[in-house]
Amino acid sequence: MPRQLSIIAYPPFASVLALCSLPVFLWLPTLYGGLGVGLGLMGIVLLGARLADAVLDPWIGRGCDQWRIGPRGVLALAAPCLALSVAALFRPPTGVSPLPWLAGSLAAFTVSFSAASIAHTALAMHWGAGEEEGTRIWTVREAFGLLGTLAATVLPHILGGSEHPERGLAPMAIGLLVAVPVLALPALMTPKTQTGAPEPNGEPPMPEETGWRSTLAPLADPVFRRLLAVFLVNGTASALPASTVVFYVKDRLGAGTMLPIFLIVYMLAGAAGMPWWTQRASSVGHRRAWQEAIMLATGAFVWATFLGEGATWAYGAVCVAAGLALGAEVALPPAMVANNLAKGGRTHLAGRAFGLMGTAGKINLAIASAISLPLLEFVGFQTGKTNATVALVTLGIVYAGLPCALKLWAWVLLGRVAETQAAGPPAQAPEAR
């Protein structure tokens, strides 16, 4: 496949990844709860899946880097497994005990989804594109991911009805059974990478160590470590509102029925803002553009801290501003990691680097849940009931105030990352085949 066509064919697979992942943690509790699985047992199963996911990501990334089949082969194997596991999760058969079925199919989903996601991300490194072209690739990929997230939010309501959106998962499973492998095929048509990455001095690479040292090899790069620290802090700031948005809209604003509209506005604003951030990154650099996005999101969430019941139009404006910032915050971090790997001649570590970023994303969600839910319970917050003022004020602080403080911390940490700091000359781009 010619180079430009392969670049166009690559990003759409990100949309089906989002279509697979969001309903799993959003609607599975309702689906399997209706089949008699208790919430406590279901919580244990979901927590186990998330913990296993976090541990697996760096090892899967190492496999993408070191196995003979490379990320292309990993994606080719993972895509059909992902399609089958999603179909199993979304369409549990009758006459089978639902809890073992949930545990088994969720384990298969966790492994196949992580493998497909990391391999697809690592494939983008195979073009060896320059910073500007590389940023466009990442931006388009994340735009498809946002559109997939939007579809995953809306489709269950369309297919299953507003009263029982979990019923929409069964018809979604049929579509995903076809869409996942079909959209994986063009993504596989990337140019093949070089078999061994050259060292900065032009010599062939030394044999890599095995075990954890090899799996964590990207952490030896100080620039990557600083970027990962920013990703952790900023990601936790984003995960806090994600874990409490339902409570905030329903109990603080009193507008629970408008939640889908707010989410749609938020994600559409993110997709619409991506071309601007791509241009901005090429003008002022990735670090500066990301810092501007952090400040835009911080300004929006400061406002959200003080909104009260009925402030739907004001919160809609918050969704627009925060969504515009989202476009940069999902596209620029992987672009900065990719550029740093390319500048230092370390593209052979791409799978492990993105695997570690995946682990950081899971840690963000775990930290956010560990902070927000116990704190809200401590102040006596109860969703769907009349809450004391202190509980609603705490909800506003957890949803918006604390994320603002964390984003300011991330802004400071990001200022310490030098975009041009990387060992060695730029890696040579392999020819597209």
Image: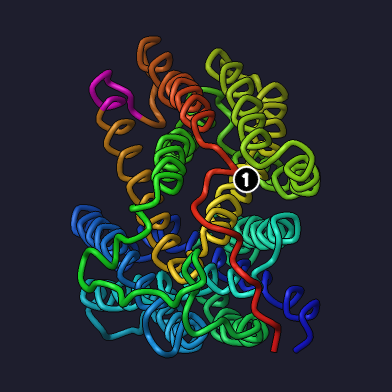
Quarter location, residue 225:
top left
Relative to 50, does residue 254 appear above or below in the rendering?
above
Residue at 58% in and 59% down: 425
Examine the structure image and report whether residue 351 is included in the region drawn in magenta.
no
| Residue 374 x/y as whole percent | 25, 30
The answer to whether residue 417 is visible is yes
Q: Which residue is mark 1?
A: 260
Quarter location, residue 87:
bottom left
Relative placement, left or right, of 219 versus 428 is left
| Residue 389 x/y as whole percent | 40, 10
Closer-to-camera residue (304/421): 421
Q: How many marks?
A: 1
| Residue bounds of the magenta highlight | 375-382
The answer to whether residue 36 is visible is no
Relative placement, left or right, of 153 versus 113 is right
| Residue 74 x/y as whole percent | 44, 83
| Residue 395 x/y as whole percent | 41, 22
Q: Quadrant of the N terminus?
A: bottom right
Residue at 73% in and 80% down: 6
Relative to 284, does residue 57 appear above or below in the rendering?
below
Q: Quadrant of the C terminus?
A: bottom right
Local SS, label 1: helix
Residue at 60% in and 82% down: 184
Relative to 370, does residue 145 appear above or below in the rendering?
below
Residue at 70% in and 83% down: 432
Q: Residues within 10 Å of mark 1 (few under 14, many from 20)?
A: some
Quarter location, residue 297:
top right
Q: Amino acid at mark 1?
A: Pro
